[in-house]
Each structure stands twice: as C-alpha cells, then as structure tokens.
Image: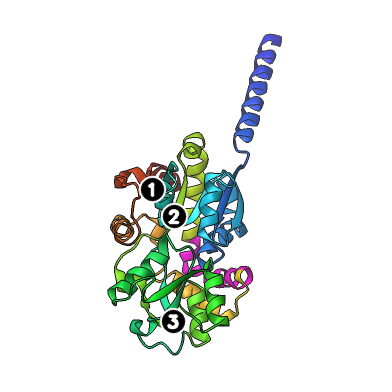
C-alpha cells in the first residue's frame, strides 16, 4: 500500500506540475498595435471591452498614429509589433524603404469618399485649389491624384497637395478653412462632413473600382519569431469583427463609437450602419481582397512608382497566419 500511495502521490504531483505549465503557457502575450483614430478601430475597442483579445491570450497595447509616415517609421524601428492601416503603406515600406514587411490580413476597401468645399460643384472646379492628404506618397493620396488625373488635373500644375495627417486632421483642416478645398475622408469623418455642408463627389470604390485598403502588416522577422501569438491575435481580431457585425451588438457598438470617438449619437449610429454595409464597410472576417490588391499595385505603379523597386505580388503577402487563425475559430 505505501508503494501504491507513493505512486498516486507522484502522479498527482506530475498532474499539478502539468497544470501549472499549461497555465503558464496561457499567460497573455503582449501585442503592440498601431492604427488610426477613426471608426475602423471599432473591432479593437469591442475586442478589449468584451474580453475577446484576453480570451485568445492576447494583451493588446493599442496606440494611435497621427499620420502614416510616423506609423511606417515606428514599425520599422520596432516601436510596435503590428500596423493596422492602408496596405499601400506596407508596399511603400517594401519598395521605397526596403524593409522586410509582410501583409498578414485584409480588412476593408477604405470606406472612402472624395469630399470638397460647398462651392465646388465638380472635379474641374478644383483647378488652382489645394488637396489635403495624409502623406503625399501613399494610399488615399494616390487615389485622389488618380481621380483628379482622370478629370484632366495634374499635381503641381493644376492643384497643390498639402499633407496634414490622419483623417481627423484632414476633416479639421477642411472644416476650419475653405482654402483646403478637397480631401479623401473615411468614417466617421464622412458623416460629420455631410453635417457641416461639405460635398461628396463620390465614393472611391465607385470612382476607381475595388481597392484593398485597410489591413494588417508586420515585420517578417517578428512574424517568424511570434507565429502562434500572431495567429491568436488575428483570431481575436476576426472574432471582434464578427461581434461588431452581429446585429445583436448594434447598440453596444454604437455606444463604443460614441464614447471612443466622442461622437454625437446620430453620427455614431450612421457610422455604424456604414461600417457594416456589405458593399461598403468591413470585409467579412477581415478577408484579403486579391482583386483590390492588384488594383492597388496598378494605381501605385501609375501614380507613384518612379524609381521604386518592382516586387512580385507574392513578395508582399503571407496569409498563412490568417488561415491558421481562421482554423482556430472553427475548432
């Protein structure tokens, strides 16, 4: 009996040790994410508030940027682990800054509209005026330049580009001065722009076609060293987006938008409707849009790629982490 008792005791000790090891393995992993302070950050706010990130073993450190140039430089310098913004910034990091970056998820088509001051009735009226952008060499600035080029207006000859930063700063610049004639805006700033009398000349997806805008990108070395953490992060983000898109969570989502972005209830409500609009808002499960990405590269090639390195499309993307994250959600 003593031998048997010792055997059982030893077994219990082993089980306890294994249990402690499992608990230690579930210690939340810190992921530092940098994004823009706009409505597309709602899945982050929802995932934190509902504990979704925590349940996936992620301790999310969420920070906001005031412009894409700072975001690109911050990611390259290791000041955070993952950037969530327009994927053209990832392309710029690879082609211009020669950084080893990979795109690991999609997100949305931009939710962008081309807004102008009330006195402007057409694109032709922008001749001699000022276009407000985030950074002049990536993403939505390139969309604006292409749209204006389609209407016979060339940068530097027919209009001037003025970088001011993120969407909140572009909206503020247009609201404060009619000299700032035009800008591409996204949510919630499009809703606010309409309320103060600014005019929309159209959604960019209608003017230019499909576009892979928002998504997630990381330094390749970080992904290799933190693969399981990245997969859990992506699973948490996808689940958070599903939570946002669920009509049962509409009221709480609107409340979060109003609280986090300091929005009136009517603006928050309209913003939410557009975020979940199947033809305009979030891509289901933050899926990557290959056609939209091809259009992104074609646009960059036409408007921006002068002396930049030409890289095969597959060089930009590694969706293996995303695919494994989806599988976690179906277990």
Read off the residue under disc 1: 95
The kind of secondary structure the magenta stretch mainly shows is helix
One can see residue 136 in this view: yes
Which quarter of the image is occupied by the N terminus?
A: top right
Q: From what the image shows, is residue 230 above or below residue 201? A: above
Question: Where residue 181 sits in the image (x, y, percent)?
Answer: 46, 80
Instruction: Depth check: give the residue in front, 102 or 154.
Output: 154
Closer mark to the observer between disc 2 and disc 1: 1
**Is disc 1 surrounded by few (<14), some (14 to 19) or many (20+) residues within 10 Å?**
some
Task: Please state the extent of the stretch shown in magenta in the rendering.
Answer: 243-260
Mark 2 surroundings: few (<14), some (14-19) or many (≥20) residues within 10 A = many
Please state the horizontal and vertical placement of residue 216, each as a whole percent of the image: 46, 52
Q: CA distance from mark 1 to mark 3?
A: 32 Å
67 sits to left or right of 315: right
Direction front: furthest residue: 157
Of pointers 3 and 2, the one earlier in the residue sequence: 2
Residue identifier under label 2: 89
**Disc 3: which residue:** 116
Residue 176 quadrant: bottom right
Compared with residue 194, is residue 88 higher up or lower down, i.e. above or below? above
Q: Is residue 245 magenta?
A: yes
Determine the residue positioned at 56% across, 71% down: 169
For the residues labelled 2 and 1, the Cα–Cα distance comes to 10 Å
User: Quadrant of the image for the C terminus?
Assistant: top left
Tag 1 near tag 3, CB within 8 Å: no
């Amino acid at each position: 009996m003593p031998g048997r008792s010792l055997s059982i005791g030893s077994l219990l000790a082993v089980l306890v040790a294994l249990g402690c090891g499992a608990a230690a393995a579930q210690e939340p992993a810190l992921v530092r994410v940098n994004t823009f302070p706009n409505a597309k950050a709602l899945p982050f706010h929802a995932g934190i508030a509902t504990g979704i990130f925590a349940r996936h073993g992620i301790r999310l450190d969420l920070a906001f940027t005031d412009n894409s140039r700072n975001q690109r430089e911050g990611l390259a310098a290791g000041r955070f682990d993952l950037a969530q913004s327009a994927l053209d910034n990832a392309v710029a990091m690879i082609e211009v800054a020669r950084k080893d970056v990979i795109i690991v998820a999609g997100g949305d088509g931009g939710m962008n509209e081309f807004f102008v001051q009330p006195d402007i009735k057409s694109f032709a009226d922008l001749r001699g005026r000022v276009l407000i952008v985030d950074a002049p060499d990536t993403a939505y600035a390139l969309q604006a330049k292409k749209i204006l080029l389609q209407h016979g207006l060339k940068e530097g000859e027919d209009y001037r580009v003025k970088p001011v930063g993120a969407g909140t700063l572009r909206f503020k610049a247009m609201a404060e001065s009619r000299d700032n004639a035009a800008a591409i805006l996204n949510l919630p700033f499009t809703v606010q722009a309409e309320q103060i009398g600014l005019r929309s000349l159209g959604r960019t997806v209608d003017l230019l076609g499909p576009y892979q805008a928002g998504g997630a990108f990381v330094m390749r070395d970080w992904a290799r060293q933190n693969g399981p953490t990245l997969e859990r992060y992506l699973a948490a983000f996808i689940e958070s987006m599903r939570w946002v898109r669920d009509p049962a969570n509409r009221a709480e989502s609107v409340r979060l938008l109003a609280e986090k972005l300091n929005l009136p209830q009517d603006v928050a409500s309209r913003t939410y409707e557009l975020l979940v609009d199947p033809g305009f808002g979030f891509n289901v499960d933050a899926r990557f849009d290959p056609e939209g990405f091809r259009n992104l590269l074609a646009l960059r090639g036409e408007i921006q790629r002068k002396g930049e390195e030409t890289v095969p499309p597959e060089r930009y993307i590694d969706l293996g982490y995303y695919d494994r994250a989806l599988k976690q959600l179906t277990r």
